[in-house]
Amino acid sequence: MERIPILRMGSFLLVTIQVDMHDRLAMTLQDDLTTKIVQTGADGVLIDISALDIVDSFIGRMLGNISAMSRILDAETVVVGMQPAVAITLVELGLSLPGVRTALNVEKGMAILRASRTLLGEEENDDVSLEE
Amino acid sequence: MSVWKSETMPIRTQADIVHVRQAVRTWSVDAGMRLVDQTKIVTAASELARNTLEYGGGGELLLEALSESVRVGLRLTFTDHGPGIPDLELALKDGWTSGGGMGMGLSGSKRLSNEFEIESQVGVGTTVRITRWK
């Protein structure tokens, strides 16, 4: 069965969506990601959608679901790289992706994830340095 | 107004929704649409193709390339022979859904099009026609 690869980078998971997803593939990604968060104890998920030339209500809902599910599993999700034409269309379609954290590119997304981990680390693990 | 090219595509499986998106993308590029306009009509097509499959139990898309004096456009007609929509006004409201969706499909694709028509008869089926001009 076709699957979207999920890469592990330290305590983060990285997903790059590079195919025109049919609906079942999107559902599979949702399942795979939640499983992987629990397996790896990841505390951040970065989803790169720069190769997606449309986001319709189904994919929008999937991004919202992934964000909500990962939050419950104690991981922050950041969606990065949305093309300008996609953003314009999405808002006109009537979706503003509430609850989905976004960043312009992978670098900025990683910075958000690192910052939120550092913040958590300071609260919970004073003895372990999570910076650097 | 003249139709200078047309094609019919089946909408029977989820893979067909992907094929519809790809065909509408190619046709909108051929019509010389800007990227934002391409994105809008492809997104609208994706929403309506999914409606045809999920709510109409499958059907077909008629793709037409139009020209009228100096302008060109694309007209997409989605037809199903499903249960039909009893209350069109309600179905066109943002956020209303009879299924598990977000209820943005019909109202959203109307906003993404220049022209929008819908006909539906309970027990007979539904036809949605959208046009986007370059």
Image: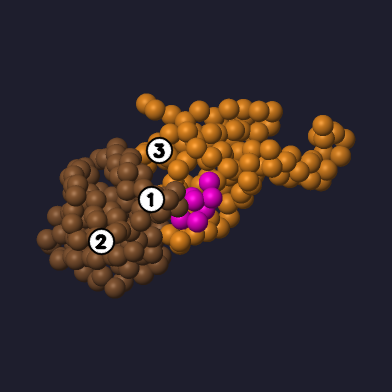
Chain colours: A orange, B brown
Residue in the picture at 82% in, 32% down: A132
Q: Position of residue B111 (x, y in %)?
A: 38, 64
Q: How far across and how far down the image is residue B40, in percent?
A: 40, 54
**Residue B97 occupies quadrant:** bottom left
Whole-angstrom CA distance, mark 1 to mark 3, is 23 Å
* Residue A23 occupies quadrant: top left
First in sequence: mark 1 vs mark 2: 1
Q: CA distance from mark 1 to mark 2?
A: 17 Å
Q: Which residue is mark 2?
A: B69
Question: Residue A19 at what x, y percent from top left?
Answer: 43, 34
Query: Could you tell me if the residues under marks 1 and 3 are in contact, i.e. CB atoms within 8 Å?
Result: no
Q: How many marks?
A: 3
Q: Of discs 1 and 2, which sits in the foreground?
A: 2
Identify the mark at residue B43; answer none if there is no mark. Answer: none
Residue matched to label 1: B33
- The answer for which chain carries disc 2 is B
Decide: few, some or many residues near mark 2? Use Cα within 10 Å; few <14, some 14-19, many ≥20.
Answer: few
Magenta segment: A83-89
Above or below: residue A8 compared with residue B43: above
- Say if mark 1 contacts mark 2, CB within 8 Å: no
Question: Relative to residue A120, is residue A57 drawn left or right?
Answer: left
Mark whose residue sits in front, 1 or 3: 1
Label 3 crowding class (10 Å Cα cut-off): few <14, some 14-19, many 20+?
some
Q: Amino acid at mark 1?
A: Met
Residue placed at 19% from the left, 49% from the top?
B4
Q: Secondary structure at mark 3?
A: loop
Q: Secondary structure at mark 2?
A: loop
